[in-house]
Image: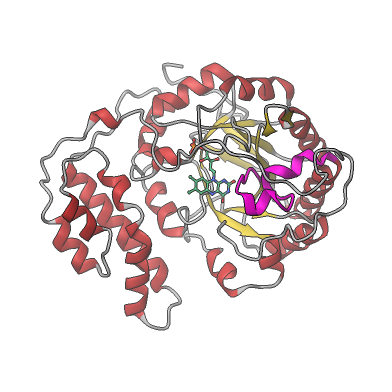
Amino acid sequence: MSGSGRQGSGPGGGLRIGRHEVWPPVVLAPMAGITNVGFRRLCREQGGGIYVCEMITTVALVERNPKTLRMIAFGDDERPRSLQLYGTDPEITAAAVRIVVEKDLADHIDLNFGCPVPKVTRKGGGSALPWRRRLFARLVRAAVDAASPAGVPVTVKMRKGIDDDHLTYVEAGLAAQDAGVAAVALHGRTAAQRYSGTADWDAIATLKQALDVPVLGNGDIWEADDALRMVAHTGVDGVVIGRGCLGRPWLFADLEAAFEGRPERRLPTLGEVAATMRRHAELLVDQFTAGARNPARGERDGCTDFRKHVAWYLKGFPVGSELRRELAMIESLAQLDDLLGKLDPAEPFPVATLGQPRGRTNSPGKVFLPDGWLASRDDDTVPEGAELADSGG
Ligand SMILES: Cc1cc2nc3c(=O)[nH]c(=O)nc-3n(C[C@H](O)[C@H](O)[C@H](O)COP(=O)(O)O)c2cc1C
């Protein structure tokens, strides 16, 4: 796509998610341990879109788990406030959604059916659940019914299926549409693929053809121009960006430029990357300090949370291993400033990293499922022990 022609489901050519008009048609993918309020603000400072919070489990919300309640935090100016829920039980999910709408905790609810981790699929949750088509439909409908009186749109995010022999995405997409969802997001991989190989954009195109509600494409968008390629290839109404923005929040500025037909793409120098790292750490410190009884503790916790991002920011830059190691162990902003001061600010962006995968790229693996799971598609019994008590994945 070139030029400034807006395309998509909304009247202005943007993405419409229920009552929310979204421009550019870009969604920050929910990522456990990453997309907290501080990281989302950092990304939002770069460009428009929807920025989804870390996954919240329905059981933890219904039980008013204090850690979970703290995780449901949004910036004052964050609209729509987008919350992802993980659930396996229609009744518990409906109860969690009622809490969200009654307490006005969010403006958009996404349901997670993409999680491939064994502890989740072994119990029939996450990416295993759509296989049980009746249970899936019941669960989505329960969420939509609980959210719709308040006008809060519900979306689902899913994978292609369990493996290549057990694909569910078209059937699940149609069922979710029937249940009243506002959009469907597809990560073009099966659960068995985890994060290996390449995302199947043809499957995303197939889903787009099959549905009337907006479809969001997800998987392997590393650069803004990949997003335009995905739209051109699949016709999707919007794109969902996960790993591509790790250590590169400015990708959201590039995405906005790309969708507006502007040519500029950011290639920050190491000095500019260091300033972004400082901003990120500062936002995490603010996040952990808010509500903390001991502000010094908030600074340390924010810095600890920042450590996992260091390697992503420095990927491809010529920075020695000792300095990298020290940066990945910071306990205070003063320490961070001191270490960032040792970087060469004029170092140009390592263009060889452009378009390269980052973050998780693990190998395919066996999908662990409850006994008899594949043989009984129409069994809609709620799987036992599949709820997660811990939010954040
Ligand atoms: C660290 C990490 C945590 C994730 N956590 C979640 C999650 O809580 N909920 C979810 O639906 N997907 C989660 N995902 C999957 C992403 O949302 C996304 O679907 C996936 O990374 C593919 O998109 P990408 O190729 O743009 O990264 C996670 C991915 C990563 C790398």
Q: Can the viewer see residue 385 in this picture?
A: yes
Magenta span includes 272: no
Give the colour scheme shown: secondary structure
Q: Residue 108 or 300: which is nearer the viewer?
A: 300
User: Residue 251 in the image: x percent, y percent?
Assistant: 37, 37
User: Residue 78 in the image: x percent, y percent?
Assistant: 49, 54
Dividing the picture into quarters, in which one does residue 385 lie?
bottom right
Q: Is residue 312 above or below residue 338?
A: above
Dividing the picture into quarters, in which one does residue 165 lie?
top right
Extreme residue in the bottom direction: 293
User: Residue 94 in the image: x percent, y percent?
Assistant: 78, 58
- Horizontal side of residue 279 vs 25, given as left or right: left
Magenta-drawn segment: 113-133
- Horizontal side of residue 264 vs 184, given as left or right: left
Query: What residue do we see at 12% from left, 45% from top?
Result: 345
Q: Residue 358 or 157: which is nearer the viewer?
A: 358
Quadrant into which the C terminus falls = bottom right
Query: What residue do we see at 47% from left, 31% from top?
Result: 220
User: Residue 68 in the image: x percent, y percent?
Assistant: 59, 67
Q: Can the viewer see residue 260 in this picture?
A: no
Q: Is residue 293 above or below residue 371?
A: below
Dividing the picture into quarters, in which one does residue 263 lie?
top left
Total residue callouts: 0
Magenta span includes 117: yes
Query: What residue do we see at 41% from left, 54% from top?
Result: 39
